[in-house]
Image (spheres, grey):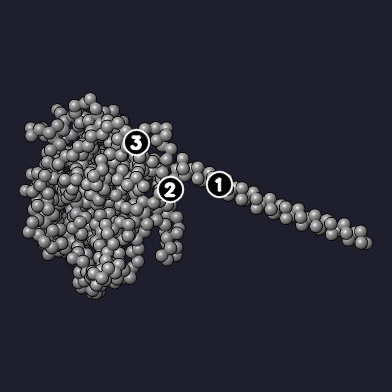
Amino acid sequence: MSTSKSKAKYTETQSNLSENVSGIRVIREYVDSLVFALILAFFFKAFAAEAYLIPTGSMAPTLMGRHKDVFCEMCGYQFQVNASEESDDQLPAPLLDYDGTLLPLPRVVGGTCPQCRHTMYLGEDNVDHKNYRSFNGDRIFVNKSQFDFSNPRRWHVTVFRYPGKPQINYIKRLVGLENETVRIEHGDIFVKKDGNTEFEIQRKPLPQLLAMLRIIDDNNYVLPELHDVGWFDKWNNSPSGKWKRSEDFKSFSIDTNETNSNNSANSAQPNSPATNTHSNSEHWLEFSNIVPTSDDWFFLKQQRLPNTPQAATNPQLVTDFLSYNSGILRFPDRTGAIRLEPEIFFPIITRNGKSRNEHFCRQSTNGLGLNWVGDLAVSVKLKVQKTQGTFALSLVKGGIIFKCEIDLATGTATVAIDGHENLFEPATAQTPVKSKGNYKIMFCNIDEELRLIIDGKEINFGTKNRYDRLCIANKNNPLSRNRQPTLRDVKPVGIGVKDSAVVIEDIKVWRDMYYIACDEVNRSNCDLLDSPLNYVRNAYTVEEIERAVNRFFANPDYWKLLGQTRQVEFQLKRDQFLMLGDNSAKSKDSRLWTEDRIPHYVERNMLIGEAMYVYWPHGLRLFGSSWAIIPNFKKIRRIR
């Protein structure tokens, strides 16, 4: 009996010992795995890839620094507003009271929607008690081994050590390569390589082109209620009146064989003689760039027509306005008290029969776009109902109509410069648009090239769609780069149909990114030789400045110098590269480094790698709380 118990105890002891050894082995395996993972992570970080946090908005909206991410309370469009100034490290100096006490940081309390141009109040004391919190910047992965196997690439987003403080990493878009001279003019990049005598415009690859487009109008966020009070529609019929508008104003249809309908896309026209000339046999839907002022929105928000709508709603030229830069900052005064800014007042607002006091914002004068942008694009979702006739898109720059026409029976696309076929021979190519169905079509007039993208694929015209050779500055040259805009430019986009039936929706108008030509001497948000702000010398209040700038871009009497901009040049030698921020108006990049007494270039040994992915944009809130910890999969993206 004792022997049996001894054997059982021995067996139990062995079993426990075995379990302990097994447990120790499992723990050791976990520790070994963890150590190995940490070694791999260190190796990966040191030699392959590393994560970075974007602190500022110099690359916005491609990459976001600290910002507010809001939905417009009027049209519902989602947009971002820079909030980098809310961080200590972004202030030039601490905010101190007279006695040396540290004052609270400034707060962003307003921002302007790029779609409807309504300026929202975002302060914590808003009457609806909404929490418009600020989020930290994008977190990105950077490929640190990129330059071990290949040379730096133009237009790619690059991380490097700042030449003035090598311990600080910067991120910009690489636009200038070694052994070339880079010129910035009219918002575009031109390059003269060593040994050449002429500058050539630099065109963006399609992924970068699409990433650098900025929205002007997205018809998915149209406001039919504004039409009901008599406000002007941006999309209108040419005199034929064949286009019919859907009840929600988001789509349009046409059958050229049908008679006119009561829901045709006509409304009161803006007070402007501007019109684009097209063939009488084509039926056109035209876009007017109508930009409501803050005063207009004071009435429109209350579902009332402004007192002077015709004066306020003349269509305007497209400018380089960027909503990210439209933030209204609230600084505590020297007593630490909160005050209203000049852009904000507290009137009685009446909506839906209810009146209350609420904050109302005028657009910040720091965010006004002051440069005319003529490089535009239009995209539509096209539903072909009859495979006959033609579908066309047109874009205007400097009074010249650039046109793309697709034969719906054969799929042949033709790009041309209307009225200048003797200078530019129309170019043709085959497209898949030759049967009934849905097609996503984008037409671009950017970087002196006409580009057509259908269902995400660019149509190949060879080089026949390029017209830069016709843009030499000459007073007698109708396509000169220095030509000024005309009244056609306030209606810069057209959609036309001939002898067919189609439906269009998801209509968007875009502009190209505009690089402002400035250096340490001429630092400004405008590169015109005579700035629009020179026409507002007698305007002192926020209201007066906004009105004056709007009048400038709506009145052709002021446009004589719009085609004549400054130009700046930067020479690069071996192993030197030029870096510019996508947020050109708010970027401390190669153009301005000489202010810090450092050269305008980045040397090869200062390059770290190329930005690859935004792996963690700001998260989504958990159950409406302030914890933004849910992955925001929609905004996780490849960096272009």
User: Tag 2 or tag 3, which sits nearer the N-term?
Assistant: 2
Disc 1 on helix, strand or loop? helix
* Amino acid type at mark 2: Ala
Q: Are marks 3 and 1 in contact (CB under 8 Å)?
A: no
- Nearer to us: label 3 or label 2: 3
- Give the alpha-carbon distance from disc 2 to disc 1, as whole Å: 16 Å
Residue neighbourhood size for the residue with mark 3, other residues' Cα within 10 Å, grouped as few (<14), some (14–19), many (≥20): some
Reading the image, the residue beneath label 2 is 51
* Image height of 206 relative to 195, above or below: below
* Amino acid type at mark 3: Arg
Q: Residue 600's x, y, as percent? A: 25, 40
Q: Are marks 3 and 2 in contact (CB under 8 Å)?
A: no
- In this orientation, does residue 282 appear? no
User: Tag 1 or tag 2, which sits nearer the N-term?
Assistant: 1
Reading the image, the residue beneath label 3 is 604
Q: Residue 279's x, y, as percent? A: 16, 38
- Give the alpha-carbon distance from disc 3 to disc 1, as whole Å: 31 Å
Does residue 448 appear left or right of residue 613 in this picture? left
**Which is nearer the eye, 317 or 22?**
22
* Image height of 5 relative to 149, above or below: below
Residue neighbourhood size for the residue with mark 1, other residues' Cα within 10 Å, grouped as few (<14), some (14–19), many (≥20): few
Reading the image, the residue beneath label 1 is 37
Q: Residue 412's x, y, as percent? A: 28, 31
**Which is nearer the eye, 227 or 93?**
93
The residue shown at (12%, 33%) is 473
Residue neighbourhood size for the residue with mark 2, other residues' Cα within 10 Å, grouped as few (<14), some (14–19), many (≥20): some
